[in-house]
Image (cartoon, rainbow, N blue to C red):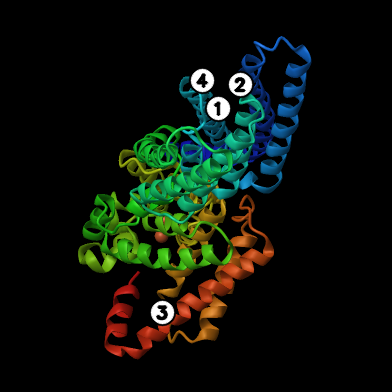
Amino acid sequence: MKGLRRKKKKTRKIGKGDKKTLKQKEKERNRAWWIVGVFLYAFLLLPLIYSCKGSGEIKTLWGKGIVLGLVLFLSLAFLYRYRKDSFPQPSHLSLFTLIVVFIYYLAWGSLKFFHHYFFLPLPLLGMVLTPFFGSGVSFVAVILVSFLISLINGLSWASFTYALIGGSVATIGVSFTHRRMEVLRVGFVVGIFSALYLSAFGLIEGYKEKLWLIPSWGFLNGILWSMVTFGILPLLENISGMVTDAKLLELSDINHPLLQRLRKEAPGTFQSSLMVGILAESAAQAVGANPLLARVGAYYHDIGKLKNPQFYGENLSFFPRFRNIHDRVNPNLSALILTSHVKEGIHLGKKYKLPQAVLDIIAQHHGTTLTSFFYEKAKEIKGKEEVREEDFRYPGPKPMSKEAAIVMLADAVEAASRTLENPTTSRIRNLVERIINEKIQDGQLYDAPLSLKEIDLIKESFIRTLSSIFHTRVEYPQKNQGEKSDKGNS
Ligand SMILES: [Fe+2]
Ligand SMILES: [Fe+2]
């Protein structure tokens, strides 16, 4: 009893904390944008002040300061208005700021050291920002830094265009890549573009040096920064805890040690996670969320079940001795074991160094859902007054991202679909609609950034995917029967 009371207190605390955290987070996020603005202004201004040093013109400095303020304000306003989703946490803004400032200073150093603009590191800016924040954010940063470089470099139109071309080609190129190695190929393409630009510019301006020498520096510049990117991307991933497509692709490999453990130790959970992955990926595609993150999140969402796989419905057929385990156990204990797989999952995920985005999906995939079967059972045994609903709810938090919400819904739909007899399209539709409506009515999607239209698109996607899967099963009745008898036990 003492233990139960302790658990109740903990659940309440978590519930209250979530709401507070959400409001606080929103405020913190807005404050972070202002702090970033001031920080960026101060650090981007320093090289401009330095570049005015010799001229002695205070008016020039004022002018550059105002121009910087205008361009920076516009850039941040654009990002805040159109790309706010790329910075879900203040730490993302910090990483963005650090990358921009570091590469800007590197560019300034390169100008001072080489006395020309051929080795500007703008390709590095595009190649590093795009995997973390997307091509839109990267473009804004490339334009901003290219402009500031030209401001330092005596309003040089040539350096602005050169920087812009290198950064833009890198941004576009990397947005097409999914594997880390491919960044080297992008470096090659950036090199060719830079060399072509410098050749063309040489023809216009008439370089004193041999015509082939300067373009080859441009080519080397592309190759050099792609090699640097290849080296530092994993480092930035580890430091920031942010995830790139390359990392997600690595994690989506079924041979990952954690997934292999799941396959061997909890085969039912493994199969169901793959299925949730298929449902979540296409639903994420339908609403413009990250399909790869949704799939990977689904693959790992139940890894916490590795601790006691025999307690979960989908694994019971693999553990015949435990077939009636929940009949022999107190419903409070059953609920406690079931709900603990979320905490266990986070613990295991951290041990295997899963990125924060995947850990968040693990933490949020049940929200504060009620384990209704055991709740009802406990009420039957002990009486309504003696049973507290909070003791039978998952600890939360509720899903806070599109991907986490999609995995929650896909998980619930997949579990329910296992018991579906004669799965016609209309039965599938009824099931999907019932499950999603239950989640909405229970307030589980309260914190998820999904519109009603998007929920509808997710629903339709689930119906389409399930219908196509069941259609295939109907065509192979023998396999169908085998699978059904397995899953019917869960
Ligand atoms: Fe789960
Ligand atoms: Fe699950």
Residue, disc 3: 469
Cβ of mark 2 under 8 A from ligand 1: no
**Between discs 2 and 4, the one toward the N terminus:** 2
**Image coordinates for residue 375, horizontal then vertical, percent:** 49, 57
Residue, disc 4: 112
**Between discs 1 and 3, the one toward the N terminus:** 1
Q: Are marks 2 and 1 in contact (CB under 8 Å)?
A: yes
Q: Are marks 3 and 4 in contact (CB under 8 Å)?
A: no
Q: Is residue 336 visible?
A: no
Left/right placement of residue 42 relative to residue 410 reads right
User: Relative to 370, does residue 93 appear above or below in the rendering?
Assistant: above
Label 2 vs label 3, nearer the camera? 2
Q: Nearer the viewer, residue 265 or 485?
A: 265
Residue, disc 1: 101
Kind of residue sitting beneath label 4: Lys
**Image coordinates for residue 75, horizontal then vertical, percent:** 68, 38
Which picture quadrant has residue 351? Answer: top left
Q: CA distance from mark 2 to mark 4?
A: 17 Å
The residue located at (66%, 27%) in the rendering is 151
Q: Is residue 175 visible?
A: yes
Kind of residue sitting beneath label 3: Ile
Dividing the image into four quarters, tell me where ligand 2 lies: bottom left
**Between discs 4 and 1, the one toward the N terminus:** 1
Q: CA distance from mark 3 to mark 4?
A: 62 Å
Secondary structure type for disc 3 = helix
Q: Residues within 10 Å of mark 3 (few under 14, many from 20)?
A: few
Kind of residue sitting beneath label 2: Phe
Q: Residues within 10 Å of mark 4 (few under 14, many from 20)?
A: few
